[in-house]
Amino acid sequence: MLIEMTDFARRRLFPGDGRATAIQDCTAGEFTARLNAEPPHAVLPGYAPFCRLHVHRNWTSTKCSVIPITAENRHLLRSAYEARTPAELPVLVRWFEGLQPPVANWLIPILYSREQMAKEGTPIAAEWGIVGCLYTLEPEEIPMVPITMLRNALGVGEGGSGVPIDRAAYARSVAFWSTHANWR
């Protein structure tokens, strides 16, 4: 099975500006080469048949992407309207500023099939394209952010995948993200 880095993921995971929230200690090419050379610890089903997650032990100094919200750190939460790309509508996002999470134990690349990538206007040569990556303490998926589920339901034209909302998955996502936030 061949995996390819998409431009969308490269911009977010390897922005080249020294951002602490990026994948550390390797280039996008080195990251992709390692994923292709090393079998994953586990393969998790994604939110749709065209999506899967490969669980790899973290070989970098990349830190966890999510931090629990506590009474002690709630005052460090920030929010703004942002778009992931110029073509997308800005949505409300929130994050911590001023916190340092621990180094992640696991890197979990999110992969889309070649067919889905073509449907979304990003043809790839490999069987699977990297569209994101989770950095976690446990070898398990972090629930998709609720707004991403909504964007996906809006369809490819709005930056989503066209997968309808799963109400139970959405409720689990809301429960998780009500008590956790990303950091910058």
Image (cartoon, rainbow, N blue to C red):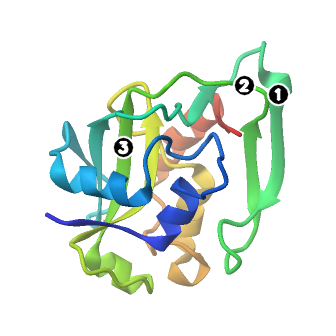
Looking at the rendered structure, the kind of residue marked 2 is Leu
Q: Please say if the residues under marks 1 and 2 sit with CB atoms less than 8 Å apart.
A: yes
**Residue ID for mark 2:** 99
- Of 35 and 80, nearer the camera is 35
Determine the residue positioned at 56% across, 46% down.
22
- Nearer the observer: mark 1 or 2; the answer is 2
Q: Quadrant of the N terminus?
A: bottom left
Measure the C-alpha gap from mark 3 to mark 1. Answer: 27 Å
Q: Secondary structure at mark 3?
A: strand
**Residue ID for mark 3:** 108
Residue 136 position, x and y percent, is 44, 32
**Residue ID for mark 1:** 76
Instruction: Classify mark 3: residues with Cα within 10 Å, few (<14), some (14-19) or many (20+).
Output: many
Q: Earlier in the sequence, mark 1 or mark 2?
A: 1
Residue 102 in the image: above or below residue 77: above
Residue 47 showing in the rendered view? no
Residue 170 in the image: above or below residue 100: below
